[in-house]
Amino acid sequence: MYDSYTLARSAAELWRQIIANPSMDDHVRKPDILSFHIGSKLPVSESVRQKLLEIDGVSYRLQKEIQLLKAFNHIKCRNCQSHIAKRSDMVVMSTDGPLGAYVNPHGCVHETITVSNATGLALIGNPSKVHSWFPGYSWTIAACMACESHIGWLFRATKKNLRPRSFWGIRSSQIADDTQVDQGD
């Protein structure tokens, strides 16, 4: 239960369920690196990620990551708790997995989770190809239909050969915290 190598194997297997065929073998042999890798890439809010990465001890951090990976099934709006997407909707659009950090021309960093399907979102404005984080894709702002907060963007392929044809980028700062991260749990 507290062996970091056993926990690393369990965490890596759960991570593989989210990210199709990631190369985790080297990380499993280095549980400390694996725990920080998963902790930095988990599709959770920024506050949960910060608390997770501040946990002192590899085994404790891996245990909490396993708990979060098992519990993570839905992405909800932070402001109104409206359902946006499911874990099974996540799609990998970068080498970092479904979560990436992107900078807009104004210097604002947006940690974004990419999903293939989303519900309860309204598009605002027209699609734009300017400053797209994903070459060959246009973007349109997406807001929660219930509370109108800016949730993210819809990305649509502008070239016929691109797959997927469209996907959503959901801002991790707009995701509800379903699971608290405390070392005392």
Image: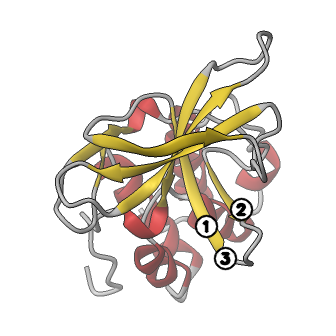
- Residue 125 on image: x %, y %: 49, 46
- The answer to whether 176 is drawn above or below residue 19 in the figure is below
- Residue 107 on image: x %, y %: 74, 78
Mark 2 or mark 1, earlier in chain = 2
Q: Secondary structure at mark 2?
A: strand
Looking at the rendered structure, which numbered label has been put on residue 110? Answer: 1
Image position of 180 (left or right of 143)? left
Residue at image location 48% in from the left, 75% down from the top? 46
Image position of 72 (left or right of 132)? left
- Residue 106 on image: x %, y %: 73, 76
Q: Are marks 2 and 1 in contact (CB under 8 Å)?
A: yes
Q: Specify few, some or many for label 2: CA neighbours under 10 Å numbering under 14, 14-19, or 20 or more.
A: some
**Residue in front for this viewpoint, 42 or 94:** 94
| CA distance for labels 3 and 2 | 8 Å
- Residue 93 on image: x %, y %: 69, 37
The quadrant of the rendering that contains the C terminus is bottom left
Q: Nearer the viewer, mark 1 or mark 3?
A: 3
Colouring used for the render: secondary structure
Residue at image location 72% in from the left, 66% down from the top? 104
Residue at image location 65% in from the left, 36% down from the top? 92
Residue that badge 3 annotates: 108
Residue that badge 2 annotates: 102
Regarding residue 15, the answer to whether it shows in the image is no
Image position of 64 (left or right of 136)? left
Q: Secondary structure at mark 1?
A: strand
